[in-house]
Amino acid sequence: LAGPAACFDVIGYSRGSIIIYCYNKLSGNDGYFCKESTNQCVFLETDQKQNSWDHGGRVSLTCGSGYYFSGHLRVYYRDLSLEDAGTYRCGETGVWNHTVNLRVKTDPCCLGPKTVIGYLGETVTISCSYPEEFQTNTKTFYKLHGQYVSTVIRTRDTQKGRFSISDNRRSRVVSVRISDVREDDGGVYYCGGWIEAVEVSYLLLYTEIHLQVSGEKLKVLLKIIISCFKLDKTVFL
């Protein structure tokens, strides 16, 4: 796995995810992502290589898509833990490689996935705390589509259709409001930010949100009321 190497720091958060883009277009050979301490690797899907890294389904490699990323190696690293910190290599066998120094931090803002319930036709607010060091960065709200994420709205946009966003820097909370909630709004979202560099850039995804859309708010409220009524009767009996 030889070739000229450059080093870049990538910062992730425990229970969060990152998507790393290793620049240099693949020319037909095997793309790879390897952990140096164990020399274990994940390769792009191919009949010629066998993955040697048992990562529990948390790491996947694809070719990037879109105007800027088409043909570049893309690494999706999910559910980070402190043990994932270390030095990695991404590249194309025998052609080029970059060295990635992954630093994994813990922060009260990033405590793993959370579930939010929205109701059809109403407004739902999704709030994410973020690390102090990203206080002045642009925050972005993404939606997951299979192996890829798409940008829904950024803090520099303020409003985009039914979506609006605000950033309270004092409390370090970014909030996204979705009005007139629709069924296809359901899914997995991320709060995060884009870190740009020359050889390696990455998406820092520090909070994962599962938005569940329901059309039965009245039924849910009735169940709660009935449950409370039964509890009160039990107490008085």
Image (cartoon, helix red, strand yellow):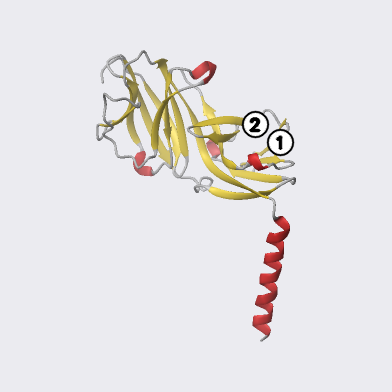
Residue 27 placement (x, y as % from top left): 36, 13
Q: Is residue 124 visible?
A: yes
Residue occupying the point 65% across, 76% down: 231
Task: State the residue in front, 168 or 159.
Answer: 159
**What kind of element bears circle 2?**
strand
Residue 138 visible, this angle: no
x%, y% of residue 219?
A: 70, 60
Q: Residue at x 54, y 16 (%)?
A: 67
Which residue of the protein is positioned furthest toward the front in this rendering? 47
**Labels 2 and 1 touching (C-beta < 8 A):** yes
Where is mark 1, residue-wise? 164
Closer to the camera in the image, 161 or 10: 161
Q: In which quarter of the image is the C terminus?
A: bottom right
Q: Which amino acid does label 1 sit on?
A: Ser
Q: Residue 99 carries which label?
A: none
> Which residue, given by chain and number where applicable, does mark 2 sit on?
153
Question: Is residue 111 depicted above or below 40 in this figure?
Answer: below
Mark 1 residue element: strand
Give, as a three-letter code, the residue at label 2. Ile
Residue at 33%, 35% (x, y): give it. 86
